[in-house]
């Protein structure tokens, strides 16, 4: 009996706790159809952004990103997506994994038209259980994950597909953000 108790105690200590410790909460898997994780982050002004508060008001598109060449090429499509649906209640949040000063210059240069925050430690990627950059999470009003799109696509197809899912989520006509950006680029030439 003493050996059994000693083995149990050793196992508990090896696992990082004692038999008297409460069980550690297990993070729910972040997947389509599951509730969005609890997530708070400070924006560039120091104001706390609370995902639960935002999704109580309407759908939210969270984009975990950086300023690399691929993400930079994708940005125009996500800015068009945000502009197309913001009046219908969509909030877009870009979370950058670059240093504050670099992001501040990038935001100014690109005339970023959506809410953003900086997470140079990458804690957001842990909360959302992803290692892929960029990864986009569309969360409906109420907090259920509707779509997850991981990976970089400078052609605009990922943004186009997310645009269609946003339109369906808010019961609006879909906007072809890929075509809109390409038309805007042609018009600027």
Image: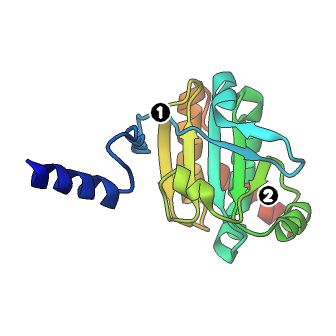
User: Is the residue under label 2 in contact with that under label 1 (CB below 8 Å)?
Assistant: no
Quarter assignment of residue 49: top right
Residue lying furthest bottom in this view?
69
* Element type where label 1 sits in the image: loop
First-in-chain label (1 vs 2) = 1
Whether residue 8 sits left or right of residue 54 in the image: it is left
Q: In this view, does 154 lie to the left or right of 126?
A: right
Any part of residue 80 in sight: yes
Q: Which colour scheme is used?
A: rainbow
Q: How many marks?
A: 2
Residue 65 at x, y = what percent?
Answer: 65, 62
The residue sitting at 38% across, 51% down in the picture is 17
Up-down relation of residue 25 to residue 125 (above or below): above
Give 145 or 179, whichever is nearer the viewer. 145
Residue labelled with disc 2 = 184
- Name the residue carrying label 1: 35
Asked whether 156 or 180 is in front, the reply is 156
Looking at this rendering, what residue extends furthest in the front direction? Answer: 2
Structural crowding at the residue carrying mark 1, measured as other residues with C-alpha within 10 Å and reported as few (<14), some (14–19) or many (≥20):
some
In percent of width and height, residue 62 lies at: 63, 46
Return the x and y of residue 170 as percentages of the image width and height: 60, 26
What kind of element bears circle 2?
helix
- For residue 61, which numbered disc appears in the image? none
- Is 154 or 45 nearer to us in this picture? 45
**Looking at the image, is mark 1 or mark 2 nearer the viewer?**
1
110 to 8, vertically: above or below: below
User: Can residue 175 be seen in this snapshot?
Assistant: no
Q: In which quarter of the image is the C terminus?
A: bottom right
The residue lying at 86 percent from left, 52 percent from top is 44
The quadrant holding residue 104 is bottom right
Residue at image position (50%, 53%) is: 149
């Amino acid at each position: 009996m003493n050996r059994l108790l000693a083995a149990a105690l050793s196992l508990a200590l090896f696992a990082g706790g004692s038999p008297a410790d409460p069980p550690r909460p297990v993070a729910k898997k972040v997947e389509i159809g599951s509730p969005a994780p609890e997530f708070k982050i400070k924006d560039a002004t120091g104001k706390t952004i609370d995902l639960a508060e935002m999704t109580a008001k309407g759908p939210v598109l969270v984009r975990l990103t950086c300023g690399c060449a691929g993400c930079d090429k994708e940005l125009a499509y996500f800015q068009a997506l945000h502009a197309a649906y913001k009046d219908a209640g969509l909030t877009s949040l870009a979370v950058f994994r670059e240093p504050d000063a670099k992001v501040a210059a990038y935001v100014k240069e690109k005339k970023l038209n959506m809410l953003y925050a900086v997470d140079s430690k990458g804690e957001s990627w842990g909360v959302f259980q992803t290692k892929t950059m960029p990864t986009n999470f569309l969360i409906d009003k109420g907090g259920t994950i509707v779509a997850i799109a991981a990976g970089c696509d400078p052609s605009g197809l990922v943004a186009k597909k997310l645009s269609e899912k946003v339109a369906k989520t808010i019961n609006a006509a879909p906007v072809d953000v890929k075509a809109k950006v390409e038309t805007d680029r042609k018009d600027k030439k």
